[in-house]
């Protein structure tokens, strides 16, 4: 073997906060997720990761969302949460999400 683990599935989260992220993703019915457009799916993924970072002290301060298809993968969203918090504080604590 080449040392890699291959999994089949339609939804993945990895890392110490993944159980929290999956919990948010599971609030949307599988049939609804399958009907989502890419933009809506990315918004759901970002929301799940943000929520995970609030609950998991070991989650990193960076969000990276990728679209994976049979043709490959591409990064569609990235955010440094440290900078987001700074912007939030500069706006007087008004949430953007």
Image: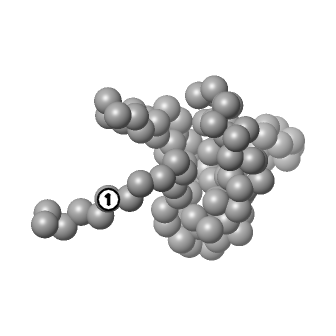
Image quarter of residue 41: top right
Display colour scheme: one colour
Q: How many marks?
A: 1
Q: Is residue 20 left or right of residue 97?
A: left
Compared with residue 59, is residue 92 higher up or lower down, i.e. above or below? above
Image quarter of residue 18: bottom right
Compared with residue 46, is residue 37 higher up or lower down, i.e. above or below? above
Identify the residue position indicated by label 1 in the image.
6
Seen from the viewer's position, the closer of residues 57 and 14 is: 14
Seen from the viewer's position, the closer of residues 10 and 76 is: 10
> 10 Å neighbourhood of mark 1: few (<14), some, or many (≥20)?
few
Which residue is located at x 63 percent, y 26 percent? 37
Give the x, y percent position of residue 46. 64, 44
Which residue is located at x 83 percent, y 43 percent? 95
Give the x, y percent position of residue 1. 13, 66
Q: Is residue 46 left or right of residue 29?
A: left
Seen from the viewer's position, the closer of residues 17 and 68 is: 68
Which residue is located at x 68 percent, y 52 percent? 25
Compared with residue 38, is residue 27 higher up or lower down, i.e. above or below? below
> Helix, strand, or loop for circle 1?
loop
Seen from the viewer's position, the closer of residues 35 and 16 is: 35
Give the x, y percent position of residue 21. 64, 59
Which residue is located at x 70 percent, y 41 percent? 31
Which residue in the rendered view is the most extreme toward the left? Answer: 1
Q: Is residue 87 visible?
A: no
Q: Is residue 12 visible?
A: yes
Give the x, y percent position of residue 53. 65, 61
Quadrant of the image for the C terminus? Answer: top right
């Amino acid at each position: 073997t080449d040392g890699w683990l291959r999994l089949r599935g339609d939804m993945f989260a990895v890392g110490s906060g993944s159980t929290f992220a999956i919990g948010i993703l599971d609030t949307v019915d599988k049939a609804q997720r399958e009907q989502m457009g890419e933009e809506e799916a990315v918004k759901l993924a970002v929301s799940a990761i943000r929520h995970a970072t609030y609950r998991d002290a070991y989650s990193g301060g960076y969000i990276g969302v990728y679209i994976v298809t049979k043709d490959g993968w591409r990064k569609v969203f990235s955010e440094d949460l440290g900078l987001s918090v700074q912007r939030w504080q500069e706006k007087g604590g008004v949430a953007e999400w």
